Image (cartoon, grey):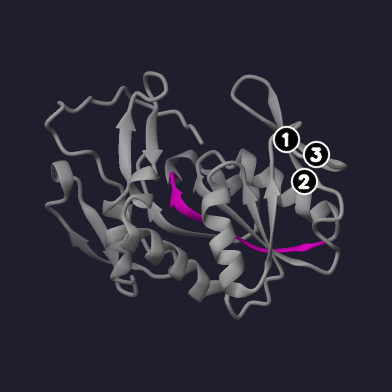
Amino acid sequence: MLFLHCQQPRVPSASAPPFRPRVVSVAAPLSVRVTGGRRGRAVVAMASADARLAGIASSIRVIPDFPKPGIMFQDITTLLLDPKAFRDTIDLFVERYKDQGITVVAGVEARGFIFGPPIALAIGAKFVPLRKPKKLPGEVISEEYSLEYGTDKIEMHVGAVQANDRALVVDDLIATGGTLCAAVKLIERVGAKVVECACVIELPELKGRDKLGDRPVFVLVEADA
């Protein structure tokens, strides 16, 4: 998922460590600020924050000017290279949702396919992929959403989600919120209940939550846009 940065970022030298996002706990007030992070960036911890969050945040690499100038790309492939950080990420989501009666985990293409299936397996729910147009072979329903220039669609197999399902929508990141909002609307159109949206990273400056209205969003890490 890509997003725009309001200012031109400084590009680090080849020997400089990568930028790092900061840790948040969305359920608690700010209590502690820990400085001395990579390149002097502060790492923000919360009173109720799980110690695992710091390891997750430090495993995420940020690539300036990718795939074009002005974009700071949140790269979760480095998190996937760290088995403990990856496991902790899944465990935190599982601990939150295991007793909420979730019957379907819907993963948003493409990185929602990484985090969604292990969560679904652990909580005993089915996994439903939400895909870009013309990627699913059977009959589909689709939901259109706006891009910076033009529109796109997200699709789901007809019958994959039922009216009595309780759904969790999973993606790696919430930025402007357009894709996540379309995913929620798609599931709600068949009569299912979206219990929550779950993302590893949030870019709060882009106000993606605004598009979701009163639908709850749970994130592990906040990062600068």
* 177 with respect to 157 (left or right): left
Q: Estimate the x, y position of residue 115 in percent, counting from the top left.
A: 52, 55
- The disc, 1 or 2, on the residue closer to the chain's N-terminal end is 1
Q: For numbered disc 2, what is the local secondary structure?
A: strand
Separation of disc 3 and disc 1 at Cα?
6 Å
| Residue 146 is at least partly visible in this image | yes
The residue beneath circle 3 is 137
**Is 198 in front, or is 215?**
198
Mark 3 surroundings within 10 Å by alpha-carbon count, few (fewer than 14), some (14 through 19), many (20 or more): few
- In the image, what residue type sits under mark 2? Met
From the viewer's perspective, is residue 48 above or below residue 148? below
From the viewer's perspective, is residue 104 above or below residue 182? below
Q: Estimate the x, y position of residue 97 in percent, counting from the top left.
A: 57, 73
The residue beneath circle 1 is 135
From the viewer's perspective, is residue 148 above or below residue 92? above
Q: For numbered disc 3, what is the local secondary structure?
A: loop
Numbered range of the magenta stretch: 192-203
Which residue is depicted at the point 36% across and 46% down? 223
**Is 133 in front, or is 68?**
133
Q: Estimate the x, y position of residue 187 in percent, counting from the top left.
A: 77, 54
Mark 1 surroundings within 10 Å by alpha-carbon count, few (fewer than 14), some (14 through 19), many (20 or more): few
- In the image, what residue type sits under mark 1? Lys
Mark 2 surroundings within 10 Å by alpha-carbon count, few (fewer than 14), some (14 through 19), many (20 or more): many
The residue beneath circle 2 is 156
Q: Quadrant of residue 164?
A: bottom right
- In the image, what residue type sits under mark 3? Pro
* 99 with respect to 53 (left or right): right
